[in-house]
Image (cartoon, rainbow, N blue to C red):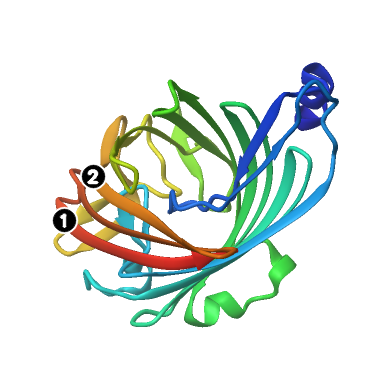
């Protein structure tokens, strides 16, 4: 309903349009552009697909290996994705399969983009080992999250995400259990260097207690029974990225560094892939 209302408010006339496929963890994107001058925008169907191989699956400053009980800083992960769009709306299917851990994930996105504004609602189905093989519609391994991204000056991106449904996203306040609405806020600035290199600086945090995704650290393990309380910075990083083209194929590559002040872990990240 929210997306439909925005569509009606914005209208269907535009001079240019750009939409990107995105994932929870990666800023690599396949861009499809439609240009129209002094003509109503045509609501055409479009699609794109891609595949990434990354040295670790990072999400909000946490590597997803900890869900499998391991503490390796290197875990190559395969991440395929496909996007189907109609005008400014799109749906996306995205997955992750790790090689050294048993963590797997399958995400479904519904997105809307207009100029510098991007709104998504996505469902995450994930699990470790046999947990990932539970019935898909059981609801035990699902979470539903809404995000808003807004880009200023084509370089400064503001990101907010709030989880509305998750079986473990609850806190106790005044003796009563209530939904925590675990959230994440991120600021990212991208600086182009020449025509082939971008440098991105990222800072992200949990604005309040987030039992769904922001645990405390005890030794080398995470204590999910005692989530980090209040405001916590979890993601500080820098990434160097570039993209090469060959016909209709694009090949994004990136090298980055991430530090999580909450867990006090450091990560070096390497990613490469292709899209068409």
Q: In the shown orientation, is residue 46 left or right of residue 245? A: right
x then y, percent, for residue 130: 53, 82
Residue visible at 72% across and 47% down? Answer: 90
x then y, percent, for residue 94: 59, 63
Residue visible at 45% across and 53% down? Answer: 28
Q: In the shown orientation, is residue 134 left or right of residue 242? A: right
Q: Secondary structure at mark 1?
A: strand
Residue behind mark 2: 238
**From where the camera sits, is residue 148 visible?**
yes
Q: Please name whichever residue, 171 or 5, is drawn nearer the observer in this view of the structure.
A: 5
Q: Please name whichever residue, 106 or 140, is drawn nearer the observer in this view of the structure.
A: 106
Vertically, is 226 above or below 50?
above
x then y, percent, for residue 134: 63, 76
Q: Please name whichever residue, 6 or 30, is drawn nearer the observer in this view of the structure.
A: 30
Q: In the shown orientation, is residue 92 left or right of residue 60? A: right
**From where the camera sits, is residue 95 visible?**
no
Vertically, is 122 above or below 8?
below
Figure quadrant of the N terminus: top right
x then y, percent, for residue 81: 59, 64
Examine the image and state in which quarter residue 118 appears.
Answer: top right
Residue behind mark 1: 266
Which numbered mark, 2 or 1, is in the foreground of this view? 2
Whole-angstrom CA distance, mark 2 to mark 1, is: 12 Å
Q: What crowding class fits label 2: few (fewer than 14 Cα within 10 Å), some (14-19), or many (20 or more)?
A: some
Q: Are marks 2 and 1 in contact (CB under 8 Å)?
A: no
Q: Please name whichever residue, 225 or 64, is drawn nearer the observer in this view of the structure.
A: 64
Q: Secondary structure at mark 2?
A: strand
């Amino acid at each position: 309903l929210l997306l439909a209302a925005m569509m009606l408010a914005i209208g269907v006339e535009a001079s240019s349009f750009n939409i990107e496929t995105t994932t929870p963890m990666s800023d690599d994107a396949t861009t499809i552009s439609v240009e129209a001058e002094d003509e109503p925008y045509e609501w055409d169907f479009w699609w794109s697909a891609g595949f990434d191989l990354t040295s670790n699956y990072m999400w909000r400053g946490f590597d997803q290996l900890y869900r499998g009980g391991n503490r390796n800083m290197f875990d190559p992960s395969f991440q395929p994705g496909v996007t189907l769009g109609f005008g400014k709306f799109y749906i996306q299917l995205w997955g992750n399969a790790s090689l050294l851990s048993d963590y797997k994930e399958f995400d479904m996105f519904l997105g809307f983009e207009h100029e510098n504004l991007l709104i998504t609602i996505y469902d995450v189905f994930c699990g470790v080992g046999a947990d990932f093989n539970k019935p898909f519609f059981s609801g035990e391994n699902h979470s539903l999250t809404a995000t808003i991204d807004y880009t200023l000056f084509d370089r400064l991106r503001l990101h907010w995400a709030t989880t509305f449904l998750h079986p473990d996203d609850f806190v106790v306040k005044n003796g009563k259990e209530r939904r925590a609405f675990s959230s994440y806020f991120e600021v990212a600035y991208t600086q182009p260097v020449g025509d082939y290199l971008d440098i991105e600086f990222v800072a992200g945090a949990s604005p309040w207690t987030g039992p769904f995704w922001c645990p405390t650290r005890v030794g080398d393990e995470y204590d999910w029974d005692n989530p980090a309380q209040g405001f916590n910075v979890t993601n500080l990083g820098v990434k160097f990225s570039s993209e090469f083209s060959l016909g209709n194929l694009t090949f994004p590559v990136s090298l980055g560094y991430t530090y999580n002040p909450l867990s006090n872990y450091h990560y070096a990240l390497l990613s490469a892939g292709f899209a068409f």
